[in-house]
Image (spheres, helix red, strand yellow):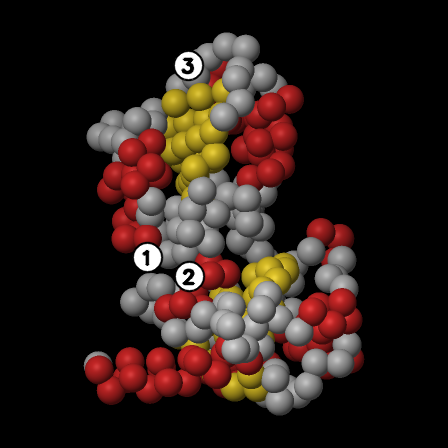
Amino acid sequence: MTSGKQGGKVYLVGAGPGDPELLTLKAARVLGEADVVLVDDLVDRRVLDHARPGARIVAVGKRGGCRSTPQAFIDKLMARLARRGAVVVRLKGGDPFVFGRGGEEAEALRAAGILHEVVSGVTAGIAVPAALGIPVTHRDAAHSVTFVTGHGRNGADPDWRALRAARGTLVIYMGMKRLPAIVDALLAAGFPRETPACAIQHGTLESQLEVVTTLGELPSAAGEAGLGSPAIVVTGEVVRQARVAAVSARHAA
């Protein structure tokens, strides 16, 4: 928690990966206290059932490839509302500090002298693979997991060769738009084409759609299945766990 000079307070809240039942108890509590909720586009709107009656709900959507609310506008709006004495919830999908710009917003609030607190959420990089039965770490298959974004600032890519050397699970956020290019880069960095891989869209929701294949076949398989954003891409030996889980789920249905 960071103290402020005056006014209300801002909570940077993670809404979880999609399924509204994966919201934390603390997130539900602060939603019930908020005067204003600034909600991202990817947050399941059922989460807003926890907001108190009369709370002002403001959509400040951000989605790759679409018209988005400028970050500077969001930063100024949070500060202005808090200075007026409002309790503000900035509601984000997943966790605010995992590819959610929460760090940038915390810096802006700190610079403005605004009281603020982070309420962590369940990040999609863990929960979405789990929804398909994939553990991102496993004592026999993966001693590490790395989270990267496929949509870096100014087009910057991760060091794919260093990630290959780590030999752990690789979880890629926001990678569907550039999936063919990302897979080409991974293969060029030494990842075997036969590496188990999957893409999961709308993870944890009723509309979840996935493909489980190999790294070399992933772009074509995802295209044939019609997968788009938002989606999580996972590569590594742990993806083999998904096959049993997927078959079991279909039989149960």
Tags 1 and 2 touching, CB below 8 Å:
yes
As displayed, is residue 60 above or below residue 189?
Answer: above
Residue type, numbered disc 2? Ala
Q: Residue 127, labelled with which disc?
A: 2
Across and down, in percent, residue 221 comes to 53, 85
Looking at the image, which residue is at 61% across and 84% down? Answer: 195
Q: Residue 109, labelled with which disc?
A: none
Q: Earlier in the sequence, mark 1 or mark 2?
A: 1
The Cα atoms of the two marked residues, 3 and 1, are separated by 32 Å
Numbered disc in front, either 3 or 1: 1
Across and down, in percent, residue 16 comes to 40, 51
Residue type, numbered disc 1? Asp
Q: Which residue is mark 3?
A: 85
Residue type, numbered disc 3? Gly
The Cα atoms of the two marked residues, 2 and 3, are separated by 35 Å
Within 10 Å of the Cα at label 2, are there few (<14), some (14-19), or many (20+) other Cα atoms?
many
Front in this rendered view, residue 175 or 194: 194
Element class at badge 3: loop
